[in-house]
């Protein structure tokens, strides 16, 4: 993620002052790998540098809350990778701490920044889709398919109590609520851990999650999240069915939005001359020149920078309140899986 963030910052015209890591040696290696001029000995040295005005927290999940808190308390704007924190309590404390400071506290739910995602959101907001009836979605990967596939995220001490849902299910739910303009109000979930051990260590976190839910307007939702689906690299798909039409977005085909109707369906291709609002604004290349994940990340970073300049989050920028929302959904999923029952999802008045 350091490479992705560094590339996005440079593409957005934002200079990178320096990098800190878990040790001076690690910081030096990261600086050399990423082409960054300065390697700080630690976070204290980084925060002592007045040239630093924005801190990107890209460390293991369990360290996010403490590092983001320190950055906020030092008066810096913060981009904190998701999950914002490994507990809803810590995420709530962070969101509250950021509120009213005038600082921009952003979380990179970057799939919001695909132009065709904004096109889908705008169609629903304009009423073209009609009342939502149902939603079907999935986020499927295969990078942890085998028993000998391992990563620090598997360790609950570093990654948190949830893995598959907190890591990628949070993206799926954020995208759902962002496009639909409605919250998930209640859910029931089942989790499964496929391999009891990885790398000689017991596994406590889930490999996949199946979930049913309801939206505020009554639409029924079916979601599948997996990191053990052979052949699926980043299969993020969301399909929303309304009374007037259905909409389908696939992250691996980001230039397209499928619009389904009873008598005719169409495939809308990204064309800034035909799009409106943010969908047109985020179309930074002409039609026929594909925009992808890195472009969405760059758009997120650019909107973060614009928010800092304007003194308030621009519309659609995911902030710490959205990170808190993801943490509450994660805890609801784990609670439902433990209880084997439907769970109400707390609402947050501070969510955007």
Image (cartoon, rainbow, N blue to C red):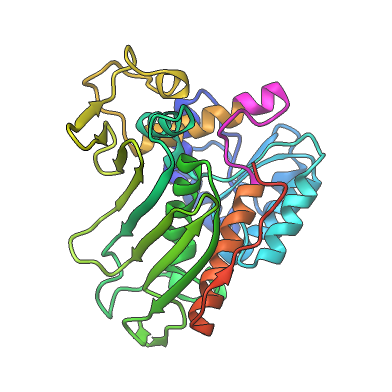
Picture quarter containing residue 158? Answer: bottom right
Q: Position of residue 22 (x, y in %)?
A: 59, 61
Residue at the image point whose x is 44% and y is 41% from the top: 131
Where residue 243 appears, as percent x and y from the top left, is 36, 41
- The residue at 54%/36% (across/down) is 37
Q: Is residue 123 above or below residue 5?
A: above
On the image, which quarter does residue 198 sit in?
Answer: bottom left
Q: Nearer the viewer, residue 110 or 337?
A: 337
Left or right: 102 with respect to 317? Answer: right
Work out which residue is located at the far top of the displayed protein and give it: 273
Residue 60 in sight from this viewpoint:
no
Q: Residue at x 45, y 30 (%)?
A: 127
Q: Nearer the viewer, residue 269 or 291?
A: 269
Residue 157 or residue 217, whichever sits in front: 217
Residue 93 higher or lower than 227, as above or below: above
| Residue 264 vs residue 229, the one in the foreground | 264
Residue 314 in magenta stretch: yes
* Residue 346 percent location from the top left of the image: 65, 62
- The answer to whether residue 269 is magenta is no
What secondary structure predominates along the stretch shown in magenta? loop
Magenta residues, start to end? 306-320
Q: How many marks?
A: 0
- The quadrant in which the C terminus is found is top right
Note whether residue 295 is visible. Answer: yes
Whether residue 250 is situated above or below residue 196 in the rendered picture: above
Give coordinates of residue 187: x percent, y percent: 50, 67
């Amino acid at each position: 993620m350091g490479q992705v963030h560094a590339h996005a910052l440079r593409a957005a015209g934002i200079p990178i002052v320096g990098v800190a890591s878990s040790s001076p040696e690690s910081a030096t290696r990261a600086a050399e790998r990423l082409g960054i001029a300065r390697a700080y000995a630690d976070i204290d040295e980084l925060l002592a540098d007045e040239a630093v005005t924005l801190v990107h927290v890209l460390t293991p999940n369990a360290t996010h809350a403490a590092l983001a808190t320190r950055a906020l308390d030092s008066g810096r704007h913060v981009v904190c990778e998701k999950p914002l924190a490994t507990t809803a309590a810590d995420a709530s404390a962070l969101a509250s701490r950021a509120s009213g400071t005038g600082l921009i506290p952003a979380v990179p739910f970057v799939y919001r920044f695909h132009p065709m995602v904004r096109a889908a959101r705008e169609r629903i907001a304009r009423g073209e889709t009609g009342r939502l009836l149902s939603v079907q979605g999935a986020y499927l990967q295969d990078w942890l398919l085998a028993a000998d596939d391992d990563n620090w995220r598997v360790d609950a001490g570093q990654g948190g109590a949830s893995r598959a849902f907190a890591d990628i299910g949070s993206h799926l739910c954020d995208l759902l609520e962002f496009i639909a303009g409605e919250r998930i109000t209640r859910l029931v979930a089942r989790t499964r851990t496929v391999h009891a051990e990885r790398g000689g260590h017991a596994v406590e976190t889930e490999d996949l999650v199946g979930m049913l839910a309801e939206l505020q307007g009554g639409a029924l939702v079916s979601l599948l999240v997996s990191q053990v689906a052979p052949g699926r690299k980043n299969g993020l798909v969301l399909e929303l069915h309304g009374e007037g039409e259905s909409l389908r977005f696939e992250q691996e085909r980001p230039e397209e939005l499928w619009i389904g109707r009873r008598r005719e369906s169409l495939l809308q291709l990204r064309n800034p001359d035909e799009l409106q609002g943010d969908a047109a604004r985020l179309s930074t290349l002409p039609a026929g020149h594909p925009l992808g994940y890195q472009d969405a990340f760059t758009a997120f970073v650019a909107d973060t920078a614009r928010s800092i300049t304007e003194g308030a989050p621009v519309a659609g920028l995911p902030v710490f309140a959205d990170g808190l929302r993801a943490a509450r959904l994660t805890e609801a999923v784990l609670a439902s899986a433990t209880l084997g029952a439907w769970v109400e999802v707390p609402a947050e008045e501070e969510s955007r």
